[in-house]
Image: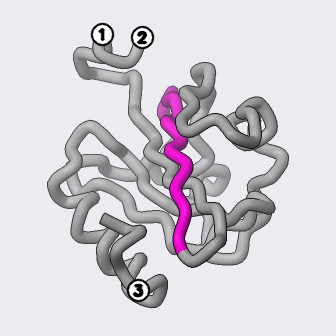
Amino acid sequence: MLQDSDINNWDSILFSRAKTYHYAQCIYVLDSQGIQITETAISQKKSQKQHLLFNPAKKGTDLSFKSYFVSRQEKQKWFISESYISNATGDICRTIVLLFHKQNSCYLLCLDISLENQDTTFIL
């Protein structure tokens, strides 16, 4: 999907996928330093809680401190985080991180999966 696409089109691809990936509440991409290089695409099925504390991260945000970035091994192709409260939605979620390469650069596709109000046995 992304590795075959122009990096300038990644935002539109993620927002399009967020409409069909109902299991993912948020989708975004980080570079190898943990900087978010796309906007956060939020599933239309997921309504954001109205609260000052919960806002999706913007392009350019440093997420290198997040456990799903720090805990994964450098060569690890995928990683699933422990449960945590999403800063984007306020829901309890887990992040699935998928490593991919494009033009000699490493990127991390992140999918936040809500653990609230759905069958999550496939990720536990």
Q: Nearer the viewer, mark 3 or mark 1?
A: 3
User: Residue visible at 84% across and 46% down?
Assistant: 65
Q: Which corner quadrant holds the N terminus?
A: bottom left
89 magenta-colored: no
Q: Are marks 3 and 1 in contact (CB under 8 Å)?
A: no
Secondary structure at badge 3 equals loop
Q: Which residue is tagged 3?
A: 6
- Horizontal side, residue 85 vs residue 45: left or right: right
| Mark drawn on residue 124 | 2
Pointer 3 local density, CA inside 10 Å: few below 14, some 14–19, many at least 20: few
| Residue at mark 1 to residue at mark 2: CA–CA distance | 5 Å
Q: Residue at x 35, y 79 (%)?
A: 5
Question: Which percent across, then down, holds residue 60?
Answer: 70, 76
- The quarter in which the C terminus is drawn is top left
Residue 6 is situated, as x and y percent measured from the top left of the image, at 40, 86
Q: In the rendered view, would you say 104 is above or below 96? A: below
Q: Position of residue 36 (x, y in %)?
A: 65, 67
Query: Looking at the picture, does residue 102 appear above or below residue 75?
Result: below
The amino acid sitting under disc 1 is: Thr
Does label 3 or label 1 sit earlier along the sequence? 3
Q: What are the residue bounds of the magenta stretch? A: 91-102
Secondary structure mostly seen in the magenta stretch: strand
